[in-house]
Image (cartoon, grey):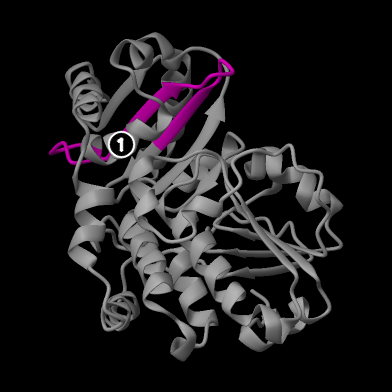
Amino acid sequence: MSIFNLDILERELSLAKSVAITGHIRPDGDCIGSCTALYQYLMDCRNELGLEQIDIYLEPFGQEFNILSATDIVRHSYDYNDTYDVLITLDCSSLDRLGHATKYFKSAKRTICIDHHITNNYFADVNHVVADASSTCEVIYNLLDYNRITKEIAQSLYLGIIHDTGIFRHTSTSDKTMEIAASLIRKGIDFTKLIDETFTQKTYAQMQILGRALFESVLLMDGKIIASSINLDTMKFYGVTHTDLDGIIDQLRTAKGTEVAIFVYETEDGDNKVSLRSNGLVNVSKIAHFFGGGGHVKAAGFSIKGTANDAIASIIPHIEEQFNSEQEIPNP
């Protein structure tokens, strides 16, 4: 990890007139929170930095995230022909994870990557990767001037933290994470509303698809693995999109006695998106990296062609290999 702080970030931006902010495909709470937080912070500093244009590019996400300020200005289309002086990627571990935003990355004069994934391959001109941080929002928080963090920015940062820590349940949560959360609460945010409306509450259709995924799940390797999948036809039947599938993998992981949860869903282009969760004995980031994906020790994912059953079958040998090593992975 290179030395990086707010002064260096501002220095990188001081010669720029236009900045784009983007994150990974199928953005989650941490990605959306970090992008909207940094956008609002830079907008507040734009005159000091001499910035004339700041844009966010993200794929469409669930309406529940509209509780955050600045989501209304996010560009969900990649038809804009803008070229930027600086492009900042957030919560993205590799260039291929940028999706259609890759064209803005390649045309930018300068690129910056801010992330917390241990599988990050340092693909930008400037890379700031804090692998032991709970979330990219935690990394962003530590870069900003606390006195300039508004209530709206605090909401974005808090939301990202709660989503990537599973409301502080995941082992990536540290004492520093809790201290940061407390400092954001002091900004006057309605943290219970943020948790309820973006993490806890589900639409009826989301509850139905969750129930379908749980009902059709199977146990493998003598109960050490729980796996489930959803195809496009099923998603169309319930009237849901991939954004409605958030949380299914974490529910699968709670099955008592299991060590690894696998959830596979079919994407519009015919590929399969695979999510992996570990309860302590398997490093799923290692598996995801093998298949061209990334993530964390206990939470990772990748995309793969073929059927869902083929995807699950291809993962099992990698899990078996780690089980055979009989070595518990360290907390991330």
Element carrying mark 1: helix
Left or right, residue 156 beside residue 48: left
Q: Residues within 10 Å of mark 1 (few under 14, many from 20)?
A: many
Residue 64 place in picture, x, y as percent: 33, 45
Residue found 40% across the figure and 70% down from its top: 152
Residue extent of the magenta highlight? 253-275
Amino acid type, residue under disc 1 in the picture: Ile
Can residue 36 be seen here? The reply is yes
Left or right, residue 15 beside residue 1: right
Left or right, residue 122 beside residue 182: right
Residue 82 place in picture, x, y as percent: 81, 50
Is 61 above or below relative to 297? above
Q: Which residue lies furthest to the left in this view?
A: 256
Does the magenta segment cover residue 267? yes
Residue found 72% across the figure and 82% down from its top: 49
Residue 15 place in picture, x, y as percent: 84, 78
> Could you say which is closer to the camera, residue 161 or residue 63?
63
Identify the residue position indicated by label 1 in the image: 249
Residue found 34% across the figure and 38% down from its top: 246
Is 176 above or below relative to 163? below
Does the magenta segment cover residue 22? no
Is 104 above or below relative to 320? below
Residue found 23% across the figure and 34% down from its top: 252
